[in-house]
Image (cartoon, grey):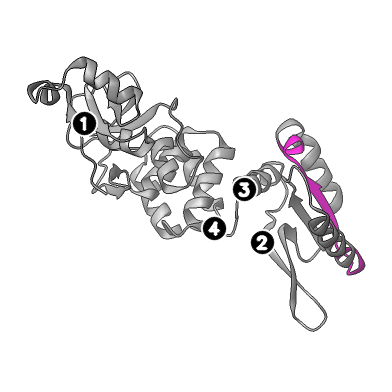
Amino acid sequence: MADRFYRYEDLHRAGVTRHAIRTFLDRRSMTRVSRGVYAPGPDDQLCGLRALFTRLPDGVVLGLWSAAALYGLARPLRPADPVHVMVPAGVVRPRIGTVVCHETALEIGPPVLRHGIPCVPPQRCAVDIARRARRLDGIAVLDAALHRGLTTEADLAQEVLRHGGLRGVLRARELVGLADGRAENAQESHLRIMIIDGGLPAPEPQLVVYDDTGYPVHRLDLGYRERKVGLEYDGRSHLTMDRLAADRARMNWLASDGWDMRYFTAHDLYRSPGLVVATVRTLLT
């Protein structure tokens, strides 16, 4: 969808006064999307980003967490969030209050348009974050990029080679080797990397459990098939009676089939990671 943007100078030349602009803004029939740039209609985050790029030099693209949000690899952008952009070598660094510039000597390559906004390619976005962010966040973004089909393991491996010699590339290379597109959410990725970092074997994501006839009956977030150990992230804040009954039936079936299950919450993962690892170690030994 193409947005219509109007600069203040153009509006002024067309006879639109400052008072009229303020009236339009108050009535939400116009939005100030950037300094001196306006668009018809109520405020829209994507519209604001597209307007921002009318003020940025050619070659500048969205990157890091901002691009990850548009790719669906991180939480959606919020109005107060900074906008992360990648500035190629030799391009004048823009100075705009909401924009965080990351100068890069590494060639960006053809940008990918996401909602009309130029972004670094998804494999570049994932590897950049893996180099710079916490291990938990890096593995979650890499897993999500694979899970959504935005890139492949081969593309990630090739991309991380391009980053050779840059800060954090050793960590990124390790995380790329551990990335698994079967993970369905960030918490599963976090739990898996915690277990690996605790010196334990990597659990299998989305492990399918079969009955005696070979029919798939359940799927676990993480597990060790040989040891019949299952691990689940429980992020639900409340349960309906129907969901509670279904979960109880599932737990009883797994217990009767010899599975040893453990359920972890956000508090366990982010307040007591050592206890999580110790629990899994006990189950395996």
Tell me the CA gap for discs 4 and 2: 10 Å
Under tag 3, what secondary structure?
A: helix
In the image, residue 4 sits, relative to residue 271, either above or below, namely: below
| Distance Cα–Cα, label 3 vs label 2 | 11 Å
Which residue is label 4 attached to?
Answer: 181
Q: Could you tell which of marks 3 and 1 lies nearer the N-terminus?
A: 1
User: How far, Cα to Cα, is label 4 from label 3?
Assistant: 10 Å
In the image, what residue type sits under mark 3? Ser
Numbered label attached to residue 189:
3
Circle nearer the N terminus (4, 3): 4
The residue segment tinted magenta is: 254-269
Mark 2 = which residue? 206
Distance CA(mark 1)–CA(mark 2): 42 Å
Would residue 266 be counted in the magenta stretch?
A: yes
**Amino acid of disc 1:** Ala
Residue 284 visible (yes or no): no
Mark sitting on residue 89 = 1
Tell me the residue at 83%/80% (across/down).
212
Q: Nearer the viewer, mark 3 or mark 1?
A: 3
